[in-house]
Amino acid sequence: MKKTIFILLLSIKVISGYAQGMSNAGTMLQDVNGKPILSNNYVEIEGNPYLPEQWTVGSIKLKNGAVINYNALRYNMASGELEFQRNDQAFILTNPFDEFTLINATFRKGFPAIDGQSNNSFYEVLYDGKLKLLCFKNAVMYEEKPYNSATKIKKFLHNTYYYLYKTDGTMVKVKKDKKAILAILSDKSSQLEEYFKKENIKIKEWSDVANVLAYYEKL
């Protein structure tokens, strides 16, 4: 009698375990740091919204200062979300973070709202002193109708905007132009004029603007 009860209980346990295993087999386990991307929403759109276009190494900096490294990261410029890849599955990063890096570029949020961007928008930091030279990038989907075609084509348009975050906590749009820079830094424009003449400074790249900002902060 006891033997019969034991066999019966063992059979129930095996069946229960098998049923649980079948249930788990049909469930997609989510990574603790992200939400799975189950479909590609951009298959009918020319181009893509990713920065960079291919997965690359990177890291995120959490609010507590901890840094987490990833072997495959990319920034979705259309959604403003950071994505990572693990075991050939793409995820949207859900950990709260204020900064991330892609290769050698650093992106940060927490700046004042401007031109449709919010304080949750990420900017690439090109100069990181008391003043900050920032670059905002986005991807916008648009439609165009080719000549003699009845079909519209969807494409991604990439936009890039540059800003200066000032010491008074305000943001202004900035151009890669000497006059525009001197107008923003008008409190020391005379010293900067001398610097431009003495060093024969030509504003051709954004790195040249960063060098001017570094000099300005030494005055």
Image (cartoon, rainbow, N blue to C red):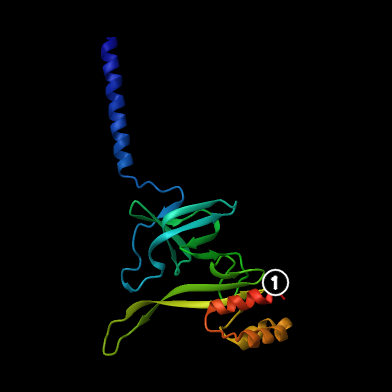
Residue 171: in sight, yes or no? no
Left or right: 196 in relation to 148: right
Outermost residue, top side: 1
The answer to whether 176 is drawn above or below residue 78 in the figure is below
Residue drawn at x 31%, y 30% is 16
Quadrant (top left, top right, bottom left, bottom right) of the N terminus: top left
- Using residue 125 as the reference point, say whether residue 190 is left or right of it: right
Residue at the location (59% across, 54% down)?
63
In depth, the one of 89 and 38 nearer the eye is: 89
Q: Name the spot of residue 185 as percent of width and height, x first.
A: 68, 81
| In the foreground, 55 or 29 | 55
Please report the residue visible at 57 percent of the width from the left and 72 percent of the height from the top.
Answer: 134
Q: Badge 1 local density, few (<14 within 10 Å), some, or many (20+)?
A: few
Q: Residue 98: image x %, image y %?
A: 56, 59
Residue at coordinates 34% horizontally, 77% vertically from top-left?
154
Image quarter of the C terminus: bottom right
Say whether residue 144 is left or right of residue 178. Answer: left
Residue ID for mark 1: 167
